[in-house]
Image (cartoon, grey):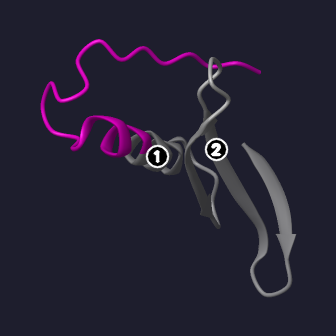
Amino acid sequence: MTTTPTVREGTAGIFFAVDRCSLELMGIHAAARGTRFEALELILQGVTRNFGSCDFAGARGLALRHVR
């Protein structure tokens, strides 16, 4: 996550997920409040894009890793 100032609404949080092997962008999401719940949106985008849907057991075997 990174933040950026906006003219009208103050600071906005920008979340992004990158595949570390291919350096492909999996998802990006911006929100006024940078909460952990907002961070899940980009995971939903990446799962839907690569597995077709985000239903129960739809992305079985997917591993996520947090890197600071």
Q: Which of 31 and 61 is in front in this view?
A: 61
The percent position of residue 5, horizontal first and vertical second, equals: 87, 69
Q: Is residue 40 above or below residue 59?
A: below
The tag on residue 16 is 2
The percent position of residue 57, horizontal first and vertical second, equals: 15, 24
Where is mark 1, residue-wise? 37
Name the amino acid type tagged 1. Phe
Disc 2, SS? strand
Seen at 64% across and 44% down, the residue is: 16
The tag on residue 11 is none
Seen at 63% across and 60% down, the residue is: 33
Seen at 62% across and 61% down, the residue is: 30
Circle 1 or circle 2, nearest the eye? 2
Seen at 84% across and 62% down, the residue is: 4
Which residues lie in the magenta part? 46-68
- Is 66 colored magenta in this rendering? yes
Name the amino acid type tagged 2. Phe
Q: How far apart are marks 1 and 2 (CA)?
A: 14 Å
Q: In this view, does 30 lie above or below 54?
A: below
The percent position of residue 18, horizontal first and vertical second, equals: 63, 33
Q: Main secondary structure of the magenta part?
A: loop
- Is 52 colored magenta in this rendering? yes
